[in-house]
């Protein structure tokens, strides 16, 4: 039972990750794919930050009279990863805009059809 | 004094000159800037290889923080070989780019092209020299993002969809790597790869570490286009600008393979990767499938660039095959093929770039009788093709010789047969091009084209020359590769 | 109490996630994504990651949403229902999820203070950074000094994104004032925007320079700074904003930020230290660390702010 | 004194929560865009305001309270402005309000 209580947090985060992953690989709409990637990445960030949590700790800003802090290292990694994620999202969306201009659609299946015709 | 800072300069130089390149208004200036930097990078790479050969593994603590606390740059023989590959290809490809980019990319984009090229170069070099698992992810993303941009600059609209497809798959791969790194950190408390490997011995037999291993392996396999995760590669190589295809075919996937080597041997160790997780058998199977299936698909392609892209997937199979043997000879053979294939594929794509410059197409049907009009270009293509098949006196022969030898030593004789079969398939698809270019008459109304300019032919022929040199005297490459493989195996055995 | 908030937020995240899968209107999905990001930012606060929360709120719920809305406006709002039933993706996702859950079984419990992740490197950051760097916010000292090289990489990544958006979308450096037809009538909005614009910039400066002591730093400040200008551009049109801060200037600033960062690294090299070894920048090692962190955070802030604006200009000027 | 403060602050928090709940209910139940906007605007300002007031009472005379005051100040501006902008945009987009046809004469 304690096994279950100690890990259910991670399990929910895994469900969140898989929701994003599913959107990416199952949906033919390109915007939805980018959004799926965004959700997938954000959920991975939640996973990392969950690792960093220490029971009874506070934010890792050193202050008098506090001895237990949460782990700062995953925070740093995720700060970096958030920015990387935004860069990916921006680039992906820019590509979507250009694809729409070139093909007139942002549906992957329709794009395949157009590519096959040529 | 400067020589101690070479590992940092190797990466920071192209990284810091990319913004400068963005500010240069004239395309020629941006090109000149990128060219100078790429040659400097090559010079640094050569010096580093000498240093590593003289003193052994180099470690450079960035910010002077001791290893697990700060980020460490770590170069051993295997890393030095990879740096040399990436830097060489970068330096050879850029002179070619001047003319080719002028034609294939709109003028206002060329400054951005060189910016992204330098960023990609910095990213790839950063991946190779870093000793830190998370830093690897960051530089992986630098190289990936810049490569999405470089691919999307191709001249047809399909370049956009190819870039998007690569972006989606690449990001999934990177996120998988991130998950794996997170799991590793969770159980070891460190991000330095050597440090992880030391602390891993206590916790290796946990389900968490097994899953971490699976995730990083799958993530990296997407990046290196291991069959069947190669789906992004054919489109990306076909629709990217010629220079970009040449650069990526020689470097991007190869760096992915290097990361895989680091993971299997340095981080997880042979005992875990190959004995407990059976990654050798899985990789061998996938590699064999890649060699056969991708070569077969290549035969039926009418776009020569696409043909070469599928051939790349097959050749990655060869390299992985060598690694999957997990023996010193096997890994060395894989690395030799990695080096040789980088040279060959780059030369082949460069000659296609010459053809594209003159013809505006790389479709097989447009290449009828081309050999009479562009003799030097086609000769370069044929020379590269021969090496791809693995004829004696070419570098391809050397690497296949070592591969077959390693497979036979370990008693995998069916693999040797497969290598020969796959070479036969290579012979068929190369022959299709040769037959069209040399023995068919050009159709009526086909444009009368001139030979490609020297600035583009020289880089291609330089690589072809190196290829024949290795074909005759492979002692240097094979020496470095065997030394590197020895170090990897030593790290892997524990 | 904290656990309860944690669970409620996780539950809300799940609901939002499923709603995103099911919803067909892309604008609606965009809004839900923004909510998802905001919820995760709140979760980060509960999990003690205040710096990350600030960043996620500014980037995920702020800028990313603006970009998504812009993309939907430039393309289409409808999502076509897929013709085939996506069975294979479902299987792949199930397998991946199952693998991850299998992996959790040997993990240390959530919040366990004895977990190896907290005992080794991170522990000494908490103990040594007040002495070695002298900055109360440990996240800042790890980000800017111990792992400063990652941050250089990160600035480069965002710079790459700017180069990519410039290459893909470009923008007109000069042009007519593009604004939606109705915006001129929004008097209230314009007045409030004018009122808030300086306040937002002031707040950005606070976040930039207070990052040593509290949550904040170059990234967050840069994004907030850009948000101020985006608000201005929304209310007064892109042309007015571009007169205020021209595209060419942004290009220079984006490059300058990366160069400042790299220059700090090279300078410390010239002064006899390793790359990014700040302690050689001043006579006193601690003062050197402070100076180094200040400078690189400045570089980060400049690049992030100008890159965000470059990206925004790129998307908005695409509309004809 | 502490007791009084605690009771006051908790009743503020609770009251705020109730208003927020009512607002959310209104968004779900009201028939068209404008009435829903109405539900959001009134209850959001009051709900969030009360919650902030409750938190200020908890904070006492400290930096936190100053920050909360600033937040209150900003919310008083942004909430109504956003709702106003939305309504105006809807008007310009020619969005029709739903009018009850069976209104008694």
Image: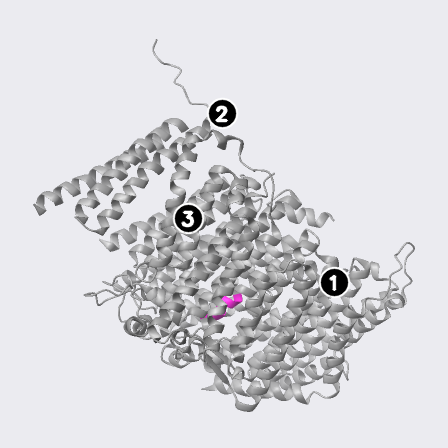
Position of residue C10 relative to residue B422, above or below, is: above
Q: Nearer the viewer, mark 2 or mark 1?
A: 1
Q: Position of residue C215 (x, y in %)?
A: 33, 58
| Residue at 61% in and 38% down | C320
Q: Which residue is mark 3?
A: C61
Left or right: D71, with C144 as reference point: left
Residue C239 sits in quarter = top right
Q: Give the magenta part as a residue range.
A: B134-140
Query: Mark 2 falls on what kind of element?
Result: loop
Q: Which residue is mark 2?
A: D94
**The numbered mark 3 sits on a residue in which chain?**
C
Disc 1 packing (10 Å; few <14; some 14–19; many ≥20): many
Query: Mark 1 falls on what kind of element?
Result: helix
Q: Which residue is mark 1?
A: B100
Disc 2 packing (10 Å; few <14; some 14–19; many ≥20): few
Q: Mark 1 and mark 3, same subunit?
A: no
Residue B209 sits in quarter = bottom left
**The numbered mark 1 sits on a residue in which chain?**
B
Q: Is residue B274 visible?
A: no
| Residue at 51% in and 80% down | B5
Position of residue A29 relative to residue B117, above or below, is: above
Q: Position of residue B60 (x, y in %)?
A: 47, 80
Report if residue B366 lies within the magenta region.
Answer: no
Q: Position of residue B375 (x, y in %)?
A: 86, 70
Query: Mark 3 falls on what kind of element?
Result: helix
Q: Nearer the viewer, mark 1 or mark 3?
A: 1
Give the Cα separation between the discs numbered 2 and 1: 53 Å
Q: Main secondary structure of the magenta part?
A: helix
């Amino acid at each position: 039972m304690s096994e279950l209580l100690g890990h259910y947090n991670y399990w929910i985060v895994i469900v969140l990750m898989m929701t994003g992953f599913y959107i990416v690989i199952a949906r033919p709409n390109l915007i939805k794919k980018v959004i799926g990637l965004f959700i997938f990445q954000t959920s991975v960030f939640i996973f990392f930050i969950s690792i960093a949590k220490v029971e009874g700790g506070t934010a890792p800003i050193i202050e008098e009279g506090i001895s237990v802090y949460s782990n700062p290292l995953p925070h740093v990694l995720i700060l970096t990863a958030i920015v990387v994620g935004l860069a990916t999202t921006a680039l992906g969306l820019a590509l979507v805009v250009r694809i729409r201009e070139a093909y007139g659609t942002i549906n992957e299946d329709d794009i395949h059809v157009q590519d096959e015709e040529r | 004094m400067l020589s101690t800072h070479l590992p940092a300069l190797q990466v920071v130089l192209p990284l810091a000159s990319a913004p400068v390149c963005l500010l240069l208004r004239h395309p020629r200036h941006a090109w000149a800037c990128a060219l100078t930097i790429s040659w400097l990078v090559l010079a640094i790479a050569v010096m580093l290889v000498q240093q590593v050969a003289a003193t052994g593994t180099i470690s450079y603590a960035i910010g002077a923080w001791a290893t697990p606390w700060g980020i460490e740059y770590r170069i051993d023989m295997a890393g030095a070989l990879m740096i040399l590959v990436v830097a060489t290809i970068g330096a050879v490809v850029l002179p070619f780019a001047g003319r080719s980019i002028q034609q294939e990319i709109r003028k206002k984009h060329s400054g951005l092209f060189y910016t992204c090229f330098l960023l990609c170069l910095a990213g790839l070099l950063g991946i190779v020299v870093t000793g830190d698992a998370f830093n690897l992810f960051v530089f992986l993303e630098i190289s990936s993002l810049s490569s999405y941009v470089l691919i999307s600059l191709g001249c047809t609209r399909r370049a956009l969809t190819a870039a998007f497809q690569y972006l989606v798959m690449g990001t999934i791969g990177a996120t998988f790597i991130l998950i794996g790194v997170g799991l590793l950190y969770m159980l070891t408390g460190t991000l330095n790869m050597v440090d992880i490997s030391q602390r891993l011995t206590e916790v290796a037999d946990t389900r968490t570490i097994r899953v971490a291993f699976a995730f990083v392996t799958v993530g990296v396999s997407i990046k290196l286009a291991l069959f069947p995760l190669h789906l992004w590669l054919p489109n990306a190589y076909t629709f990217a600008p010629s220079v970009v295809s040449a650069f990526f075919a020689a470097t991007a996937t190869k760096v992915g393979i290097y990361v895989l080597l680091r993971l299997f041997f340095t981080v997880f160790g042979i005992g875990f990767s190959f004995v407990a997780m059976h990654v050798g058998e899985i990789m061998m199977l996938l590699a064999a499938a890649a060699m056969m299936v991708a070569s077969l698909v290549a035969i039926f392609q009418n776009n020569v660039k696409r043909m070469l892209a599928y051939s790349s997937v097959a050749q990655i199979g060869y390299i992985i095959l060598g690694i999957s043997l997990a023996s010193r000879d096997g890994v060395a053979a894989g690395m030799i093929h990695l080096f040789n294939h980088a040279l060959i594929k780059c030369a082949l794509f460069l000659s296609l770039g010459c053809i594209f410059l003159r013809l505006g197409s790389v479709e097989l049907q447009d290449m009828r009788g081309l050999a009479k009009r562009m003799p030097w270009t086609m000769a370069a293509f044929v020379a590269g093709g021969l090496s791809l098949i693995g004829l004696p006196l070419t570098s391809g022969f050397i690497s296949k010789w070592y591969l077959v030898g390693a497979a036979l030593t370990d008693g995998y004789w069916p693999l040797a047969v497969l290598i020969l079969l796959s070479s036969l398939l290579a012979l068929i698809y190369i022959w299709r091009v040769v037959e069209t270019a040399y023995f068919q008459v050009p159709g009526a109304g086909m444009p009368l084209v001139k030979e490609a300019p020297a600035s583009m032919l020289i880089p291609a022929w330089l690589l072809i020359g190196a290829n024949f040199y290795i074909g005759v005297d492979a002692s240097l490459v094979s020496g470095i590769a065997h030394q590197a493989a020895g170090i990897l195996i030593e790290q892997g055995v524990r | 109490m904290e656990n309860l908030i944690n669970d409620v937020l996780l539950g809300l995240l799940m609901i939002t996630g499923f709603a995103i899968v099911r919803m067909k209107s892309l604008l609606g999905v965009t809004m839900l994504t923004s909510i998802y990001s905001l919820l995760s930012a709140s979760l980060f606060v509960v999990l003690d990651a205040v710096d990350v929360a600030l960043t996620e709120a500014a980037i995920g719920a702020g800028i990313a949403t603006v970009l998504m809305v812009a993309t939907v406006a430039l393309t289409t709002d409808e999502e076509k229902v897929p013709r085939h039933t996506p069975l294979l993706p479902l299987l792949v996702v199930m397998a991946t999820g199952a693998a991850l859950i299998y992996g959790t079984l040997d993990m240390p419990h959530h919040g366990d203070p004895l977990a190896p992740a907290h005992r080794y490197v991170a522990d000494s950051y908490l103990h040594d950074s007040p002495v070695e760097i002298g900055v109360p916010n440990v996240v800042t000292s790890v980000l800017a000094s111990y792992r400063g090289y990652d941050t250089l990489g990160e600035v480069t990544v965002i710079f790459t994104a700017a180069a990519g958006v410039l290459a893909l979308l470009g923008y007109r450096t000069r042009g007519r004032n593009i604004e939606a037809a109705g915006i001129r009538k929004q008097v209230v909005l314009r007045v409030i925007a004018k009122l808030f614009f300086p306040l937002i910039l002031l707040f950005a400066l606070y976040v930039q320079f207070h990052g040593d002591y509290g949550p904040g730093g170059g990234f967050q400040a840069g994004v907030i700074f850009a948000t101020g200008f985006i608000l201005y551009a929304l209310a007064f049109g892109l042309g007015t904003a571009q007169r205020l801060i021209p595209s060419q200037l942004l290009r220079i600033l984006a490059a300058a930020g990366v160069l400042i960062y790299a220059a700090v690294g090279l300078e410390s090299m010239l002064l006899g230290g390793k790359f990014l070894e700040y302690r050689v920048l001043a006579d006193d090692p601690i003062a050197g660390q402070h100076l180094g962190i200040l400078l690189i955070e400045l570089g980060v802030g400049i690049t992030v702010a100008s890159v965000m604006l470059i990206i925004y200009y790129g998307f908005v000027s695409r509309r004809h | 004194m502490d007791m009084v403060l605690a009771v006051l602050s908790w009743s503020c928090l609770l009251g705020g929560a109730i208003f927020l709940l009512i607002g959310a209910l209104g968004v779900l139940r009201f028939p068209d865009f404008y009435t829903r906007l109405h539900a959001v605007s009134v209850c959001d300002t009051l709900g969030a305001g009360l919650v902030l007031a409750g938190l200020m009472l908890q904070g006492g005379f400290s930096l936190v309270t100053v920050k909360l005051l600033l937040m209150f100040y900003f919310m008083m501006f942004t909430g109504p402005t956003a709702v106003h902008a939305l309504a105006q945009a809807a008007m310009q987009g020619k969005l029709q309000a739903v009018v009850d046809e069976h209104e008694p004469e």
